Image (cartoon, grey):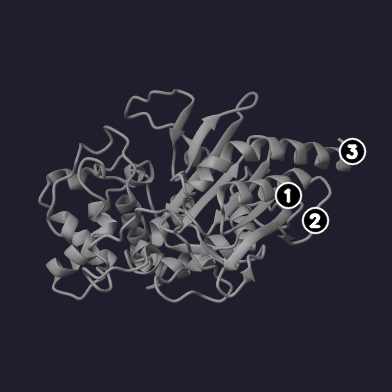
Amino acid sequence: MELHGSAVPGGEAFDDLLRAFTVQHGVAGAALAVGRAGVIEYARSIGWADIDQQIPVEPHSLFRIASLSKPVTAVAILQQVECGALSLEGLVWELLKLDTPHDVRWKQVTIRHLLQHTGGWDRKASFDPMFRSVEFAAEAGTPPPADPSAIIRAMLRRPLDFDPGKQYAYSNFGYCLLGRVLESLPGAQGKSYQQLVREQILTPVGALSPRIGRTLTPQVDEVRYYMPMTGDRVREDSVFAPGTPVNPPYGAWCLETMDSHGGWISSAPDMVRFAMGCDLPLEAGSVNPTSKRPFLLNAASIASLWAEPVSYPRQDPDMWYACGWNVRRAGSGEGRNTWHLGALDGTSTLLVRRWDGMTWCILFNQRKNVAGDELARLIDPLLHPAANQAYAALQARSGH
């Protein structure tokens, strides 16, 4: 299949992987970007942004990034902690000035709990509040979809699934709360979560394309989203026409409501630019010497970003969920790989920061292959050998 974007010496392994993977798994379209030391080294794409219109995916095409939104939100929170506007031990109930909760444990939930998915909500034990738009809108007496404030009010009337801090359970709702915390800070001056993150996190590192997506109307340069599997049925709680079957990527849930946990769209290169902004700064207030872009956090904040949770036991001592990122010890010394996956109907995404400085992002406009396997999870282990070859080529070119 034809690749779009400029060919890069040393990037042939990535080219070969994209071609083979697309054919083997029946991928609609994909974009891959790779960076190192603050510079985008590779940005290519394959397949179709719109199959019917025969519009190819370009390297700059915009995709729903799903839960890659969480690292973005986490860095925005840590930046506010760094400047003294927030504390990781700050109580969310007090910060948001919430009503008296049904469950008094709400009052124990901290910013750190939300960042590390230990706030007390377990979607496997109960449900995911972010996909209850119709029910919660009805409780609020408003037309669906429910907005974040209606979802929070509904959850205040329900019990937590466990004591805050005592276990890990992935929670979209926790990151919804973090978005509202950012909006509540005095320095926010009435700006939306999107405005704050674009101004403070994304624009400084040159990531200009990311924005909150739309459920129904694609934006300029945005791909269409496809679900090729058989046997899937749309849920009966479509947020725009309850009980009416819809194409799941376009109405079975509300993307705008997911803003701080899963609502962004972006190009692959801009996600790599963001991730490289999380590199360890050389000194306080320094900029990346090659990109000339600022580092997003100081050394102490970076340490907090990757810190191991200590409040609950882990099965694998070398892997954990830190503040918005998965972390695994790797390489030599203090080396570690940090990453996040994302998935929604019609979307599969992966962002990786590797211990040797290689950073990449791959975005698909399709969640699974016909066998029901998630594309980002399938390609994850295959990208590392390709990155090894690219790293060797970069080292050879730089004379190291």
Q: Nearer the viewer, residue 156 or 339?
A: 339
The answer to which of marks 2 and 3 sits earlier in the sequence is 2
Helix, strand or loop at disc 1? Answer: helix
Helix, strand or loop at disc 3? Answer: loop
Residue 101 in the image: x percent, y percent? 13, 53
Residue 241 in the image: x percent, y percent? 25, 73
Residue 25 in the image: x percent, y percent? 56, 48
Q: Do the residues labelled 2 and 1 touch (CB within 8 Å)?
A: yes
Q: Mark 2 points at which residue?
A: 7
The amino acid beneath tag 1 is Asp
The amino acid beneath tag 3 is Gly
Q: How crowded is mark 1: few (under 14 residues within 10 Å), some or many (20 or more)?
A: many
Above-or-below relation of 124 to 152: above
**The C terminus lies in quadrant:** top right
Above-or-below relation of 117 to 134: above
User: Does 183 sit left or right of 385 as displayed?
Assistant: left
Measured Cα–Cα span from mark 2 to mark 3: 21 Å
Q: Residue at x 59, y 73 (%)?
A: 221
Q: Residues within 10 Å of mark 2 (few under 14, many from 20)?
A: few
* Res 49 seen here: yes
Q: Mark 3 points at which residue?
A: 399
Q: Residue furthest front?
A: 230
Above-or-below relation of 143 to 386: below
Q: Nearer the viewer, residue 294 or 233?
A: 233
Q: Name the residue under label 1.
A: 15
Q: Which of 206 and 286 is in front in this view?
A: 206
Measured Cα–Cα span from mark 1 to mark 3: 24 Å
